[in-house]
Image (tube, rainbow, N blue to C red):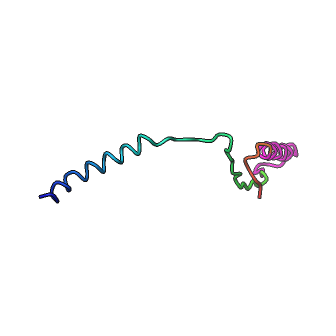
Amino acid sequence: MKFFRLQQIFPILLLLGFQSSLASGVVYIDIGKAQVKKSLLALPPFQFYGSQTKKSHLQFGQELFSVVSNDLEISSYFTFS
């Protein structure tokens, strides 16, 4: 008889204990110790697949690659391989 009552009461006590532990839990985020992990990035040079009648197209591609790679490097979120 006592065993039967314990089987009925135990799930209720377990549920109440679980809910009280969730209610007392505090989320704490320490902003001062945030760290950013750099991502490894491979950036191949841009290639021009068109008619090479003008050298300005090649120069534009090289300049664009230089600007993009410098911007990504200055952002300090990436490490180049």
Give the camera-side residue of 70 and 11: 11
* Image quadrant where one finds the C terminus: bottom right
Q: Residue at x 31, y 45 (%)?
A: 16
Outermost left residue: 1
Query: What residue do we see at 62% from left, 41% from top?
Result: 30
Residue with the most extreme front position: 2
Q: Position of residue 67 (x, y in %)?
A: 82, 42
Dividing the picture into quarters, in which one does residue 59 lie?
top right
Chief secondary structure of the magenta span?
helix
In percent of the image, x 52 and y 41: which residue is there?
A: 27
Coordinates of residue 2 in the picture (x, y in percent):
15, 57
User: What is the span of residues highlighted in magenta in the rendered image?
Assistant: 47-73
Give coordinates of residue 37: x percent, y percent: 69, 51
Quadrant of the image occupied by residue 19? top left
The question of residue 78 being in magenta is answered with no
Q: Is residue 61 magenta?
A: yes
Q: Nearer the viewer, residue 17 or 62?
A: 17
Please give the count of numbered marks on the rendered protein: 0
Residue drawn at (84%, 43%) of the image: 63
Q: Foreground: 33 or 70? A: 33
- Lateral position of residue 60 relative to residue 1, left or right: right
* Relative side of 53 to 7, left or right: right
Quadrant in the picture for the N terminus: bottom left
Residue closest to the eye, 9 or 75: 9
The x and y percentages for residue 45 are: 79, 53
Q: Is residue 19 left or right of residue 79?
A: left
